[in-house]
Image: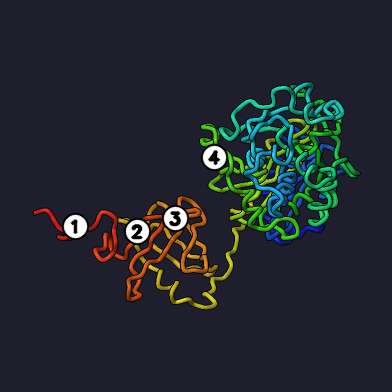
């Protein structure tokens, strides 16, 4: 993959290189490789290694662990978009006999299905998948620890079930479906289920000595959809660009937006940490930014993919050690360095191509009771309604084609905004989910619920 490092300023490139150098040295990683994505392509690549004269490039494979789950989630969302299944369907509808009860596909994607975190028996990441040939071997006798939908509880067996769902519906192995439907269309030619040279070896670093121990490489078998893949910073840079903007050959921008939308009830600690989970993607707030992506680990390897859609910056960081540098922190730092040193240049403002007078009439100041709101008409064909000042309920609205509008986010998501007119045709008020918005606070000429006192506004003398 050809990178364009010239697109980043020399000071930015040095700051990025310094950050990964510190991470590799302090984290005692045999090697660490990273990439930064901006504008839909890699613009920087860096590497640090303990081997003199050798530096892994963007084509060297590392095992990416649970970032594999994001790929599996993409396959499931494709089935949703094709109408083959609904995310609200219980898994049993499409994959009967698993014993997970009524856990829905969406709950499995968001780790809220109530399943155990790990497979029973020996440590599955360090033993052959042949020890768990059937789903029943992966799930064990008591696969459920919590009521479905009640709490976020990260589950590797849950994504094994999603991989089995893909296989059942497509009638082909998970790996084959992934290659055909995601990897090949996106050009991820160095992302594979088995390692292909050049690839990094996985190491354990002694916690109290600068000594190494090679880690075994196991085929995870049934657990593959939860963590099998090997990839490169080059391929994951392309994947990050896809997760930010979509690609109609695989998933639309709207569908990858669904993946980035919180779908799991957060634990109290998660609320404090500003972290939650979407559909196959981790979501966190760090340094004032909303970041999405995923981390991964398997014995001998650590991986992280971090995306800031608002900044149009993403980072990939891979290392070949079982534990060491906190790659989620490193990834967030790489995003922050670029976003702060070279903030995104916004697109030029452009006026509407044409003005719909009936829509323009809605623009301006409105009142819900005594709260002042502003309604704006935007160049993307939407309208937005939010407090004139301070915080409060706000949303964008999409036109329905019949004069009404549907809320897209927040409190008003899915709610109907309906402009109401007087018999003579003049605009009277807005009805938003039964809330009446008027041009004046408690307008006596509008049907304000509860009515307006006939004496009107007054002072106290």
Q: Residue at x 64, y 48 (%)?
A: 259
Residue to which mark 1 is pinned: 453
SS type, badge 4:
loop
- Residue 94: x and y in percent read 72, 41
Q: Nearer the viewer, mark 3 or mark 2?
A: 2
* Residue located beneath label 3 in the image: 394
Pointer 2 or 1: first along the chain: 2
Circle nearer the N terminus (2, 4) = 4
Q: Earlier in the sequence, mark 1 or mark 4?
A: 4
CA distance separating discs 3 and 2: 15 Å
Using the numbered discs, state the Cα–Cα distance from disc 2 to disc 1 in whole angstroms. Answer: 17 Å
Judging by the rendered image, the residue that carries numbered circle 4 is 274
Can the viewer see residue 24 in this picture? no
Disc 2, SS = strand
Measured from the top left, where is residue 363 in percent x and y?
41, 69
Q: CA distance from mark 1 to mark 3?
A: 29 Å
């Amino acid at each position: 993959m050809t990178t364009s490092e010239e697109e980043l300023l020399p000071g930015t490139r040095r700051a990025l290189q310094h950050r990964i150098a510190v991470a590799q040295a302090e984290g005692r990683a045999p090697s660490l490789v990273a990439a930064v994505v901006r504008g839909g392509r890699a613009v920087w690549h860096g590497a640090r290694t303990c081997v003199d004269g050798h530096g892994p490039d963007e084509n060297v494979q590392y095992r990416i662990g649970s970032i594999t789950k994001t790929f599996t989630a993409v396959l499931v969302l494709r089935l949703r978009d094709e109408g083959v299944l609904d995310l609200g369907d219980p898994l049993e509808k499409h994959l009967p006999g698993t014993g997970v009860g009524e856990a829905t596909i969406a709950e499995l994607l968001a780790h809220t299905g109530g399943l155990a975190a790990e497979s029973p028996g020996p440590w599955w990441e360090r033993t052959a998948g042949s020890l768990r040939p059937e789903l029943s071997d992966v799930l064990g006798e008591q696969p459920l620890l919590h009521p479905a939908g009640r709490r976020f509880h990260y589950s590797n067996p849950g994504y094994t079930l999603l991989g089995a769902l893909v296989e059942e519906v497509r009638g082909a192995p998970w790996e084959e479906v992934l290659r055909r439907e995601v990897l090949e269309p996106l050009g991820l030619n160095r992302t594979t289920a088995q390692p292909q040279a050049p690839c990094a070896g996985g190491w354990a670093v002694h916690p109290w000595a600068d000594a190494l121990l090679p880690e075994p490489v196991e085929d995870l078998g049934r657990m593959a959809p939860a963590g099998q893949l090997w990839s490169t910073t080059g391929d994951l840079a392309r994947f990050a660009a896809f997760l930010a903007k979509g690609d109609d050959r695989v998933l639309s921008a709207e569908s990858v937006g669904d993946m980035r939308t919180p779908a799991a009830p957060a634990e109290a600690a998660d609320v404090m940490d500003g972290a939650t989970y979407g559909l196959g993607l981790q979501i966190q707030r760090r340094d004032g930014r909303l970041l999405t992506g995923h981390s991964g680990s398997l014995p001998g390897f650590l991986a992280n993919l971090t995306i800031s859609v608002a900044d149009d910056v993403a980072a990939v960081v891979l290392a070949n050690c079982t534990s060491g540098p906190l790659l989620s922190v490193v990834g967030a730092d790489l995003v922050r360095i670029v976003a702060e040193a070279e903030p995104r240049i916004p697109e030029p403002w452009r006026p509407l191509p044409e003005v719909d007078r009936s829509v323009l009439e809605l623009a301006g100041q409105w009142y819900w009771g005594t709260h002042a709101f502003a309604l704006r008409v935007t160049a993307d064909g939407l309208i937005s309604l939010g407090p004139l000042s301070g915080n409060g309920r706000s949303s964008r609205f999409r036109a329905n084609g019949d004069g009404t509008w549907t809320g897209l986010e927040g409190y008003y998501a899915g709610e109907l905004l309906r402009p109401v007119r007087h018999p003579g045709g003049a605009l009277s008020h807005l009805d938003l989910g039964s809330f009446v918005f008027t041009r004046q606070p408690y307008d006596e000429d509008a049907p304000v619920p509860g009515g307006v006192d006939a004496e009107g506004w007054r002072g106290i003398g």
